[in-house]
Amino acid sequence: MERQFTVTTPIGPLYITVFGGCVTRIAMSVNESVELADTLLDAEAYIKRQIEEYFYNGRTAFDFPFEIRCGTPFQQRVWRELCRIPFGTTGTYGDIAQRIGKRGAARAVGAACNRNPLLLVVPCHRVVGKGGGLVGFACGVEVKSRLLEIEGGCFV
């Protein structure tokens, strides 16, 4: 059964969708097809605690189970590659394109980032423009800047 709950964060509420014990979606918008839970199960409380620790206590990685259940093969390759960008660092859209063997596909990488279903876990906020600029982010450049600030991120 799919469940959804909210975590209040400095960037606004995050809506977390869980299916079969795995996080399948973290977004700043509600998943209209899933009802919001009134109370949290133990696993959901564990997920919530980790997200709060990321924002308030310096957590640098998540160890709750997650699953990407959407996207094209290309998008999934991009999302897997984004998970390789270390906490506190950034890469460019062009870097990601080159790493997945699609040199010249920086815009397509940007489009895949825009459809990322797992904000924070798949760290699309760590991807910046060629000159290091904070370009493009589905949640807004202000949110991207705040996430990089929380991570103490260096710019390319």
Image: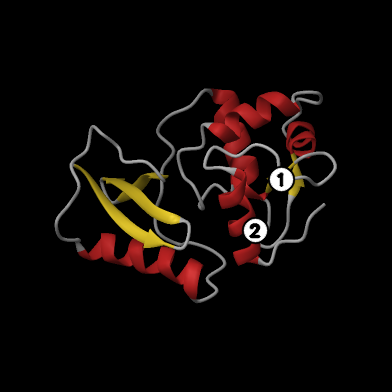
Name the residue: 31% across, 45% down: 17
Quadrant of image for the N terminus: top left
Question: Residue 134 shows which numbered tag?
Answer: 1
User: How far apart in space, not on screen, are marks 2 and 1 (Cα)?
Assistant: 10 Å
Which residue is located at x 64 percent, y 54 percent?
145
Residue that extends furthest to the front in the rendered view of this protein: 142
Disc 2, SS? helix
- Three-letter code, disc 2: Leu
Q: Residue furthest bottom?
A: 57
Q: Amino acid at mark 1?
A: Leu
What is the secondary structure assignment of the residue under circle 1? loop
61 displayed left or right of 153: left
Towards the viewer: 22 or 129 = 129
Q: Is residue 59 above or below residue 126?
A: below
Determine whether label 2 and label 1 are within 8 Å by CB: yes
**Which of these two is toward me, 39 or 99?**
39
User: Residue 53 placed where, x, y %?
Assistant: 45, 71
Identify which residue is drawn at 78% across, 55% down: 155
The numbered disc on residue 41 is none
The location of residue 48, given as percent across then percent down, is 34, 63
Residue drawn 71% across the image and 45% down it? 134
Can you identify the residue that label 2 sits on? 148
In the figure, residue 133 lies in which quadrant?
A: top right
For residue 124, side relative to residue 117 (left or right): right
Q: Is residue 83 visible?
A: no
